[in-house]
Image (tube, rainbow, N blue to C red):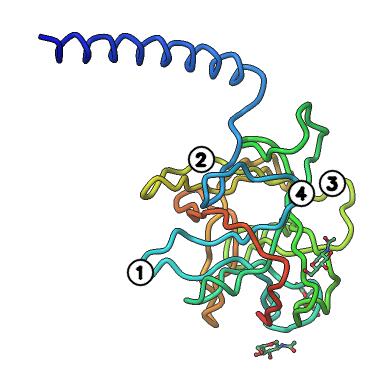
Amino acid sequence: MLQINKNMSLLALTSILLFFFMAFTAIDARILPPAVVDTDGNPVQVGVYYHLVPPPRLGAGGGLALGPNRNHSKTCPLSVVQLGLDAMRALPIRFIPVAPLGDGVDVRTSTDYIFEFNTTGTNSSICGKEPKWKVDEFDGSVGTYFISTTNEITTGMAYKFQIRRFGSIESVTTYKLFCCTTYPFVLCIDVGVYRDADGVQRLALTNDSPLELVFSKASSVEQINVL
Ligand SMILES: *[C@@H]1O[C@H](CO)[C@@H](O)[C@H](O)[C@H]1NC(C)=O
Ligand SMILES: *[C@@H]1O[C@H](CO)[C@@H](O)[C@H](O)[C@H]1NC(C)=O
Ligand SMILES: *[C@@H]1O[C@H](CO)[C@@H](O)[C@H](O)[C@H]1NC(C)=O
């Protein structure tokens, strides 16, 4: 009997807590979309570097970095690619809000960011130390838009990327990337991988197979050669 009462009061307490939690979450959600969380469960922060890697599982491939461009040459601008098996070789990346956000530090889902690599100390720095992602113009030869980089954002350029929730794997939240191009018309679509004839896995816009990713906080001491 005592046991039942205990359980019931626990249930009541849980309901009350849940009610307040949901009430506050609802208020918060009206103001700002949810924060993106990293593999440790901490909010992803503006200006801090992360590795974007697929959730660790067999055949998922490596992290995001710079690779040869569509001319198959290591000349500028380099393309954004997914590496082979070694996830740790991803280049550190940070997220710069396109429009100033009220609360500052947390990176949020469904919000526009500039994605910026830090190539310092790697041989990817041949095209600048802080290349930013941009969507190339439509490539009619394969019927898709590839993602490459630029050192300078200009108007008319498609460079705003969003992070959207994909799912979760063993309590780690996974995400996909999302982008709106402006040419030849406005098209909002997921970011996936296009495997080139030479085996390079290029990031490209896709409407059927978004790339599932997690955010792993980068340590400042990593020096990698990825190209
Ligand atoms: C590829 O080469 C062509 C012709 O030289 C040039 O116009 C184009 O800008 C190059 N593209 C890239 C991505 O380097
Ligand atoms: C890029 O990374 C290097 C090495 O970790 C660091 O010293 C530098 O401050 C970083 N650049 C920026 C703009 O934070
Ligand atoms: C960068 O480093 C990698 C690994 O050491 C090497 O395979 C590649 O040829 C280098 N690329 C350039 C442009 O130096």
111 vs 83, left or right, is: right
Is residue 181 in view from this perspective?
no
Question: Which residue occupies the foreground of this view, 5 or 164?
Answer: 5
Q: Residue 58 shows which numbered tag?
A: 1
Q: Element type at marker 3? A: loop
Q: Where is residue 208 in the image (x, y as percent from the top left)?
A: 45, 50
Q: Where is residue 103 in the image (x, y as percent from the top left)?
A: 76, 29
Can you tell which quarter of the image residue 1 is in? top left
Crowd rating for badge 1 (residues with CA inside 10 Å; few <14, some 14–19, many 20+): few
Q: Element type at marker 2? A: strand
Q: Where is residue 34 in the image (x, y as percent from the top left)?
A: 58, 31
Question: Which residue occupies the foreground of this view, 80 or 140?
Answer: 80
Q: Between disc 2 and disc 1, whose residue precedes?
A: 1
Q: Element type at marker 4? A: strand
Residue contact at pointers 1 and 4, CB within 8 angstroms: no
> Mark 2 belongs to which amino acid?
Arg
- Residue in the picture at 50% in, 56% down: 211
Q: Residue 156 shows which numbered tag?
A: 3
112 vs 171, left or right, is: right
Residue contact at pointers 3 and 1, CB within 8 angstroms: no
Q: Between disc 1 and disc 4, whose residue precedes?
A: 1
- Residue in the picture at 47% in, 76% down: 85
Crowd rating for badge 4 (residues with CA inside 10 Å; few <14, some 14–19, many 20+): some
Q: Name the residue under label 2.
A: 165
> Mark 1 belongs to which amino acid?
Leu
Q: Residue furthest front?
A: 2
Please identify, in this view, whether the residue under mark 3 or under mark 2 is nearer the observer: 2
Please identify, in this view, whether the residue under mark 1 or under mark 4 is nearer the observer: 1
Q: Is mark 2 within 8 Å of ligand 2?
A: no
Residue contact at pointers 4 and 3, CB within 8 angstroms: no
Q: Does the residue labelled 3 lie within 8 Å of ligand 1?
A: no
